[in-house]
Image (cartoon, rainbow, N blue to C red):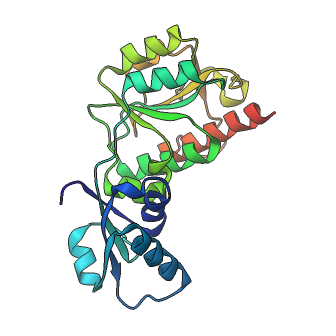
């Protein structure tokens, strides 16, 4: 058996719903018997996927994290390429709505950003291949299924890819504490990519230089910054408000 593990009910059920062919085997913690489990195991039986009831200790040994009593072995998901995303943008009638994370390294933050991206209709999340969190089992669990719905694109050279997006008519809005414009002065209604920086350090210099506009989130209290996943959520929902308007 080769591939990776997915754990947590939302994450495993998302694989079952959207990519059932990836499921190889499922382990469920003993002592749980309810309608959710019965429906789930019946679906596994219909697909011919092996499942087994085991002691919690076995689940703890397979993954590190709060598994909620379920772990699945899955085949590796197909990774989106830069070309895949550019083709999607070119072939879609919708104005591009993208999230770029420049060096977010905490898988919990990545998972939370993926979850919000799914909620607001972001078409893809873009990260650099180096010095950035990947879709680990922990990130997938925190994403609550969004890792199976939102394309995740790792690019070799983020600055070059941002130039390509600009050539495609995508407006790049970056966040920076020292920016003179606020989030509420930005226009998110057209083809746009929101660019968020890394935890603590913010965007790298080259990433910042490629942004068409820099904005900040107004802070009225004593705390001078927000967690990157919280800040991403604030910005994405302002973008959604404008795009729905």
Spot the residue most to the top.
167
Quadrant of the rendered image containing residue 25: bottom left
**Which quadrant of the rendered structure holds the C terminus?**
top right
Relative to 178, residue 141 above or below: below
Image vertical order of residue 99 relative to residue 165, above or below: below
From where the camera sits, is residue 14 visible? yes
The spot of residue 188 in percent (x, y) is 68, 26
Where does the image place residue 198, in percent across and percent down from the top left? 40, 35
Q: What residue is rendered at 51% in x and 16% in y?
A: 211
Tell me if residue 96 comes above or below residue 144 in the rendering. Answer: above
Q: Between residue 83 and residue 185, name the one nearer to us.
A: 83
Q: Please determine whether, in this image, residue 40 is positioned above or below residue 168.
A: below
In the foreground, 14 or 178: 14
Residue 75 image point, x, y percent: 28, 53
Query: In screen coordinates, is 21 left or right of 228?
Result: left
Residue depicted at 18% across the width and 60% down the height: 1
| Residue 196 vs residue 86, the one in the foreground | 86
């Amino acid at each position: 058996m080769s591939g990776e593990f997915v754990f947590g009910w939302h994450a495993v059920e998302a694989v079952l719903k959207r990519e059932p062919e990836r499921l190889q085997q499922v382990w469920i913690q003993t002592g749980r018997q309810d309608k959710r489990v019965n429906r789930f195991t019946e679906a596994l039986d219909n697909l011919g996927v092996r499942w087994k009831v085991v002691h919690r200790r076995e689940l703890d040994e397979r993954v590190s994290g709060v598994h909620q009593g379920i772990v699945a072995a899955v085949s590796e998901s197909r990774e989106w390429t830069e070309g895949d995303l550019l083709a999607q943008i070119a072939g879609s009638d919708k104005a591009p709505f993208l999230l770029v994370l420049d060096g977010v390294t905490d898988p919990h933050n990545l998972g939370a950003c993926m979850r919000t991206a799914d909620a607001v209709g972001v078409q893809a999340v873009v990260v650099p291949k180096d010095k950035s969190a990947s879709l680990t089992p922990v990130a997938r669990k925190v994403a609550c299924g969004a890792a199976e719905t939102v394309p995740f694109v790792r690019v070799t050279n983020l600055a070059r890819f941002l130039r390509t997006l600009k050539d495609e008519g995508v407006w790049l809005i970056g966040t920076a504490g020292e920016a003179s414009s606020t989030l509420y002065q930005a226009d998110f209604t057209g083809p746009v990519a929101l660019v968020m920086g890394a935890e603590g350090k913010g965007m790298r210099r080259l990433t910042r230089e490629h942004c068409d506009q820099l904005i900040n989130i107004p802070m009225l209290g004593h705390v001078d910054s927000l967690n990157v996943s919280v800040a991403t959520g604030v910005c994405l929902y302002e973008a959604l408000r404008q795009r729905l308007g």
